[in-house]
Image: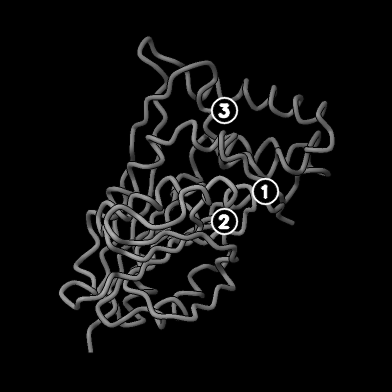
Amino acid sequence: MSTAPNWDPQQYLRHSGYRTRPFLDLLARVPRLPAAGSGRPPRIADLGCGPGNVTVLLLDRWPDAEVTGLDNSAEMLDAARPLAGPTTGGGHLDFRSADILSWAPDETYDLIVSNAALQWVPGHADAFPTWLAALRPGGSLAFQIPGNFTAPSHTLMRELCESPRWRDRLGGVLRHRDAVLDPVGYLDRLAGLGCEVDSWETTYIQTLTGSDPVLDWVKGTGLRPVLTALADDPGAREEFIAEYRERLREAYPPRPYGTPFPFRRIFVVARKREK
């Protein structure tokens, strides 16, 4: 049994620099969109847009684009909506509530993009045919997702949740290591659907600073299901965090310059063939 997490936009944005870099690396590999040279603005959807901090970066690459950010978190959408409206490049940005897996596009897009969101969506690869059908010929589906489910930050969290002390309350709450495919798995799926696929992986060595920085990082993302499940019991929540903190300190000892936090990410750009 998994728990739909409650999100804290401010906690998530505490490490926005490191969370933004993979999205920029992804966009750098997106090929020419069908709208180029057509006289119409590109139409773009951002699946799992969160607080909109990376959605706005789409307008740096395509200034006149019409961009819609989609998310099912009311907290994230509340943080994103002040960014909505006309853009300086002649485009437009808006945000809507939607569940990624059941999203049924009612219009055609030049680009469907997602940044660190699909790992929260069980069976997301099964939605690829629907999303590709909503792309114009020559359009792209591009996404990046964490591939670090075997890292200590995640294995220690799962071990603690499944321990005798926490199993009854937290067993099954977290995503498993098969929440995402590997780059070849995504290549197989999308090439089998007729796409030209560019898939790769990168491990970023992030240098975090401050007190218990890895704990601070996961409080914004991977730990959210646990924090949500224990929200009605502050004492238990603090007990879990204290035990998890000690394990993280051993796994990620600080250096004089900060705490190295290796983070593997998976990238995919699938271009729909032109007719």
80 in relation to 156, above or below = below
Name the amino acid type tagged 2: Trp
What's the CA distance linking mark 2 and mark 3?
19 Å
11 in relation to 175, above or below = above
Label 2: element kind: helix
Q: Are marks 2 and 1 in contact (CB under 8 Å)?
A: yes
Q: Earlier in the sequence, mark 3 or mark 1?
A: 1
62 sits left or right of 223 in the view: left
Q: Earlier in the sequence, mark 2 or mark 3?
A: 2
What's the CA distance linking mark 2 and mark 1?
10 Å
Name the amino acid type tagged 1: Pro
Residue 214 horizontal/vertical position (percent): 51, 27
Name the amino acid type tagged 3: Leu
Within 10 Å of disc 1 (Cα), the crowding (few <14, some 14-19, many 20+) is some
Q: Which residue is mark 1?
A: 5
Q: Which residue is mark 2?
A: 120
200 sits left or right of 208 in the view: left
Q: Earlier in the sequence, mark 2 or mark 1?
A: 1
What's the CA distance linking mark 3 and mark 1?
17 Å
Quarter containing the N terminus: bottom right
Which residue is found at the position 33% from the left and 41% from the top?
21
Residue reaching furthest left? 37
Q: Which residue is mark 3?
A: 215
Label 1: element kind: loop
Within 10 Å of disc 2 (Cα), the crowding (few <14, some 14-19, many 20+) is some
Residue 162 horizontal/vertical position (percent): 72, 42
Which dot marks residue 75? none
